[in-house]
């Protein structure tokens, strides 16, 4: 039987959301998900599924039944002819990556964090970088969901296509995903080249860099003119692995990027005036490096330092202007920003609520250490973002409501119409969804 815990406190990874749950259940299979949804409906409880709790917004918050899907994990099948894998919804990305690799396959693209469940990642629009590659949601081929009435439905481009289009990035608003069929490719290696470069030089070349590399991104260190750039490119089949030396990986990714970064953020929090000096040192600490490794080990970066984040997507050509406006705001205000600003580009897709819906997109993400106040900085960034037609990442902090978002997403009303059909009583609703969807 499903393990149940009654009335417990819960908070997400970043501590930006917390709630008291009426009930927690850990279903072991789809039948137990059905049982729990039906029981919640009989008690008038709202229901939300939770993966790793990595969303910074309240997208997965409930005061009713929380379904923890960690037991629904693993690859169920791989169809080599069709280039797709069927996986259980609670599978963490780091587990999925390793299981696919064991069979000689990989996801075509990834973000830089792999702690999320696959259902949570697609449900909030997780994306990677690369002008020829879309986010995870665009790679979904089919889904199985438990709806508000406890029925189980399968959907695909040919089977209930309206539900499929909405559920590929469904915000947890349509039902509980139990299985996904998603595009995969033969496992591949990436050649990574990472090096520091001046900010203005990077911005002058950003279009060429995005177009001439499979993946290009950079991190700007506020209060400096320095960036760390990353160029990742596929290599021919048969190329030998050339991973980072163990000592170099421990130095860069463990010591500098995590342990010392944690210490420096604690210092900057207690003594804000030290932030500029810390950033100046940090921006010069990571030297150039080049290596060749399995795709998921290149895409993913260890993130042990806890933070809060806001990320917005813009028309691709707006990246330079938006970032310079943000830099100017920081220069004109008494704010000390100790986290780098992350900048990426991605391909357009056709997913209704994707931040890249029908436009090549640039992404800018701002962060604050979790112990620091983020309000004024994030508010200023959001104001700049909205002036440039920005679309907020659904799992990252923003204050926009339905009126603004309906202007950004031409298919928002279509999404809401599907929701009205499959969850008219808002069994899967919560305050965040009320704000962004209007009801």
Image (spheres, helix red, strand yellow):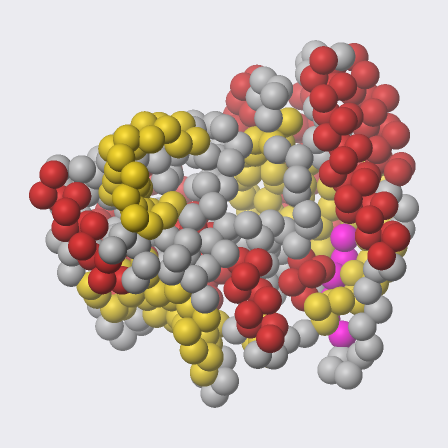
Vertical position of residue 240 compared to residue 34: above or below: below
Q: Position of residue 176 (x, y in %)?
A: 29, 54
Q: Quadrant of the N terminus?
A: bottom left
- Which residue sits at x=76%, y=53%? 230
Q: Residue furthest bottom?
A: 81
- Which residue sits at x=81%, y=21%? 276
Residue 371 seen in the current view: yes
Q: Position of residue 278 (x, y in %)?
A: 83, 25
Q: Magenta stretch: dominant SS? A: strand
Vertical position of residue 215 compared to residue 377: above or below: below
User: Along the line of sight, which residue is nearer the eye, 379 or 296?
Assistant: 296
401 falls in the magenta region = no
- Which residue sits at x=62%, y=55%? 129
Q: Position of residue 343 (x, y in %)?
A: 67, 44
Along the horizontal axis of the image, is 48 left or right of 135? left
Residue 332 seen in the current view: no
Along the horizontal axis of the image, is 310 left or right of 229? left
Residue 377 appears in which quarter of the rendering? Answer: top right
- Which residue sits at x=81%, y=28%? 279
What count of labels does the image hold?
0
Vertical position of residue 285 compared to residue 26: above or below: above
Q: Quadrant of the C terminus?
A: top left
Along the horizontal axis of the image, is 13 left or right of 438? right
User: Along the line of sight, which residue is nearer the eye, 223 or 204?
Assistant: 223
User: Along the line of sight, which residue is nearer the eye, 182 or 402?
Assistant: 182
Residue range corresponding to the magenta coloring: 230-235
Q: Position of residue 39 (x, y in %)?
A: 14, 47
């Amino acid at each position: 039987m499903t393990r149940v815990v009654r009335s417990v406190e819960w908070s997400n990874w970043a501590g930006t959301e917390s709630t008291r749950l009426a009930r927690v259940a850990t279903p072991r299979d789809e039948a137990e998900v059905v049982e729990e949804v039906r029981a919640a409906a009989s008690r008038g409880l709202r229901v939300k599924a939770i993966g790793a709790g990595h969303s910074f917004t309240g997208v997965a918050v409930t005061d009713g039944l929380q379904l923890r899907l960690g037991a629904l994990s693993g690859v169920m099948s791989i169809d080599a002819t069709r280039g797709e894998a069927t996986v259980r919804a609670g599978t963490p990305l780091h587990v999925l990556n390793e299981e696919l690799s064991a069979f000689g396959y990989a996801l075509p693209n990834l973000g830089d964090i792999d702690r999320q469940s696959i259902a949570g990642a697609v449900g909030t629009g997780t994306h990677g970088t690369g002008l020829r590659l879309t986010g995870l949601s665009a790679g979904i081929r089919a889904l199985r969901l438990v709806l508000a009435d406890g029925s189980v439905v399968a959907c695909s481009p040919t089977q209930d296509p309206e539900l499929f289009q909405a559920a590929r990035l469904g915000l947890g608003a349509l039902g509980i995903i139990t299985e996904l069929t998603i595009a995969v490719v033969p496992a591949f290696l990436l050649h990574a080249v990472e090096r520091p470069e001046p900010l203005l030089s990077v911005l002058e070349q950003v279009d060429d860099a995005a177009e001439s590399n499979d993946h290009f991104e950079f991190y700007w260190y506020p209060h400096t003119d320095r960036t760390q750039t990353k160029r990742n490119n596929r290599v021919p089949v048969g190329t030998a692995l050339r991973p980072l030396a163990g000592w170099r990986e421990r130095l860069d990714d463990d010591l500098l990027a995590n342990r010392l970064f944690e210490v420096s953020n604690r210092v900057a929090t207690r003594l804000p005036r030290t932030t500029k000096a810390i950033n100046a040192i940090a921006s010069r600490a990571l030297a150039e490096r080049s290596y060749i490794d399995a795709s998921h080990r290149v895409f993913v970066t260890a993130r042990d330092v806890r933070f809060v984040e806001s990320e917005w997507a813009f028309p691709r050509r707006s990246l330079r202007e938006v970032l310079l406006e943000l830099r100017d705001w920081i220069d004109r205000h008494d704010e000390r920003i100790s986290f780098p600003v992350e900048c990426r580009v991605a391909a357009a897709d056709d997913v209704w609520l994707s931040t890249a819906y029908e436009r090549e997109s640039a992404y800018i993400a701002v962060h604050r250490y979790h112990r620091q106040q983020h309000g004024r900085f994030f508010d200023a960034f959001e104001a700049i973002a909205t002036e440039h037609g920005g679309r907020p990442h659904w799992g990252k902090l923003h204050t926009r409501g339905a009126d603004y978002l309906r202007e950004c997403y031409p298919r928002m009303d279509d999404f809401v119409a599907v929701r009205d059909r499959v969850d008219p009583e808002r069994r899967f609703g919560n305050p965040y969804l009320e704000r962004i969807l209007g009801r």
